[in-house]
């Protein structure tokens, strides 16, 4: 999860995206979309990370009655990136729904927040049985996709939730959690975060035990958000494939949230998958710098208007109009996909959008309806149907099956 869509930021975002943008350079042709359809009918399009549960909790009163996923959620306040009609338009076949732990929650509070989001996600899936079905294995994902529904899986975002207790880790797996991101934006007792001061030089011995236990019980180790040292430590300890549920390539954009080339080079031996995210600061150095300036302006405005949210929102919107962001589009996403594919190989790349967990998205990939735009961009760069099927979900299915085999032998 990137920059959280808090209400202030979401309102400013809505003002920003209301401005005219340049569309996809050349609209996908009917033949190109038909080719996308053929690929995604055979292989489920699996996204590694979507924050709808936290968006419902944080922005819509934690009440499913406030969010009708059968309708256009762009009309909500704040708007959302995800609804069922747009998921269908985007040809999504399977989704890891993030059950997220904010860095401010610690210990038992963190654990409780994850259980509450698992419950919310279960109720969301049950509310829309024609669209969603829970999956707990690679075979489940394939079966549900063939039945015309969207396979739905849990991914914990933030290892604080296990409260330094492997028993809780095992209980989460028994509840259907298929991956855990070892930490989020802060360093915790046993693993360093990519976006916080390091304390451990990567993983502690207990952190290595967490990785080994996740392998034993068939839970994918997610290395998004962790430091480069922790990535390497986890790969040293792992006996099953790791994933990066929503990270891009450090070799293209040197953001600390991205995966360095030396780590990507280790994925073939491990069998892991780097699922490229669409978050503009992670895929464009220019946007990263712009966003830093905008964050500085937001902090300044809050300091000047500590009790006046409306004034901060209006002034930040005015700043944004006067300082428009650099263009980020599907070509930037494709650059990261191709970099991961060059370094790790086309067997080790996937997609993890981070929809409903970010304030900004590329101009032509601004909701779950727009996955085909990415596939068309890669088609125009010469990607074959077989390679696009691997990117869509084939690589993740292979990694998950390998993790299942490791667990079965344990």
Image (tube, helix red, strand yellow):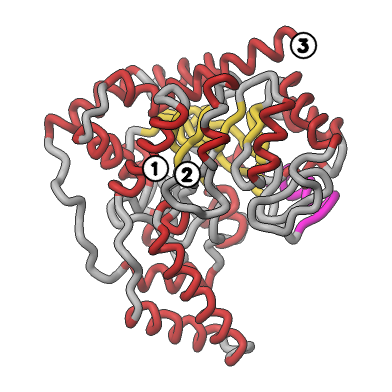
Taking the image as shown, residue 340 lies to the left or right of residue 20, namely right
> Whole-Å distance between the Cαs marked 3 and 2?
32 Å
Query: Which badge, 3 or 2, comes first in the chain's sequence?
Result: 2
Taking the image as shown, residue 160 lies to the left or right of residue 305, namely right
- The x and y percentages for residue 266 are 57, 27
The residue carrying mark 1 is 336
User: What crowding class fits label 1: few (fewer than 14 Cα within 10 Å), some (14-19), or many (20 or more)?
Assistant: many
Taking the image as shown, residue 60 lies to the left or right of residue 24, namely right
Q: Secondary structure at mark 2?
A: loop
> Whole-Å distance between the Cαs marked 2 and 1?
6 Å
* Frontmost residue, 271 versus 317: 271
Q: Is residue 273 above or below residue 323?
A: above
Foreground mark, 3 or 2, reads 2
**Is the Cβ of the residue at disc 3 closer than 8 Å to that at disc 2?**
no
Check if residue 117 falls in the magenta segment: yes
Q: Which residues are magenta?
A: 105-118
Q: Is residue 180 above or below residue 393?
A: below
Check if residue 358 falls in the magenta segment: no
Residue under the image location 47 percent in, 75 percent down: 294
- The x and y percentages for residue 199 are 80, 53
Assign the magenta stretch its main secondary structure: helix
The residue carrying mark 2 is 248
Residue under the image location 30 percent in, 47 percent down: 330
**Is the Cβ of the residue at disc 2 closer than 8 Å to that at disc 1?**
yes
């Amino acid at each position: 999860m990137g920059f959280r869509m808090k209400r202030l930021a979401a309102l400013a975002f809505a003002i920003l995206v209301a401005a005219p943008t340049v569309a996809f350079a050349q609209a996908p042709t009917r033949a190109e979309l038909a080719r996308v359809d053929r690929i995604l009918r055979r292989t489920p399009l699996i996204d590694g990370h979507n924050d709808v549960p936290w968006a419902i909790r944080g922005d819509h009163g934690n009440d499913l009655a406030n969010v009708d996923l059968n309708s256009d959620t762009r009309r909500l306040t704040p708007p959302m990136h995800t609804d069922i009609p747009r998921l269908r338009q985007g040809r999504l076949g399977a989704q890891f729904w993030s059950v997220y732990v904010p860095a401010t929650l610690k210990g038992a509070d963190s654990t409780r927040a994850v259980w509450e989001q698992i419950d919310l996600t279960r109720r969301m899936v049950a509310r829309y049985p024609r669209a969603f079905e829970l999956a707990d294995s690679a075979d489940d994902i394939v079966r549900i996709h063939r039945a015309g529904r969207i396979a739905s899986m849990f991914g914990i975002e933030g290892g604080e939730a296990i409260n330094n207790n492997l028993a809780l880790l095992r209980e989460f797996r028994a509840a259907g959690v298929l991956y855990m991101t070892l930490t989020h934006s802060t360093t915790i007792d046993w693993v360093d975060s990519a976006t916080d001061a390091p304390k451990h030089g990567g993983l502690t011995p207990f952190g290595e035990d967490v990785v080994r236990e996740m392998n034993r019980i068939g839970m994918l180790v997610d290395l998004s958000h962790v430091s480069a040292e922790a990535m390497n430590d986890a790969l040293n300890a792992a006996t099953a494939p790791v994933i990066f549920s929503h990270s891009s390539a450090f070799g293209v954009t040197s953001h600390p949230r991205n995966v360095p080339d030396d780590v990507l080079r280790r994925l073939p031996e491990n069998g892991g998958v780097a699922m490229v995210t669409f978050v503009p600061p992670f895929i464009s150095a220019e946007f990263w710098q712009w966003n830093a300036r905008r964050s500085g302006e937001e902090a300044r405005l809050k300091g000047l208007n500590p009790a006046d949210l409306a004034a901060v929102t209006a002034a930040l919107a005015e700043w944004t109009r006067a300082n428009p962001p650099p263009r980020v589009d599907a070509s930037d996403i494709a650059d990261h996909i191709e970099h991961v594919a060059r370094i790790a190989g086309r067997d080790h790349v996937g997609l993890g959008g981070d929809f409903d967990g970010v304030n900004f998205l590329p101009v032509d990939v601004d909701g779950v309806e727009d996955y085909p735009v990415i596939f068309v961009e890669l088609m125009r760069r010469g990607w074959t149907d077989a390679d696009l099927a691997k990117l869509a979900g084939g690589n993740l299915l292979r990694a998950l099956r390998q993790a299942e085999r490791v667990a079965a032998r344990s």
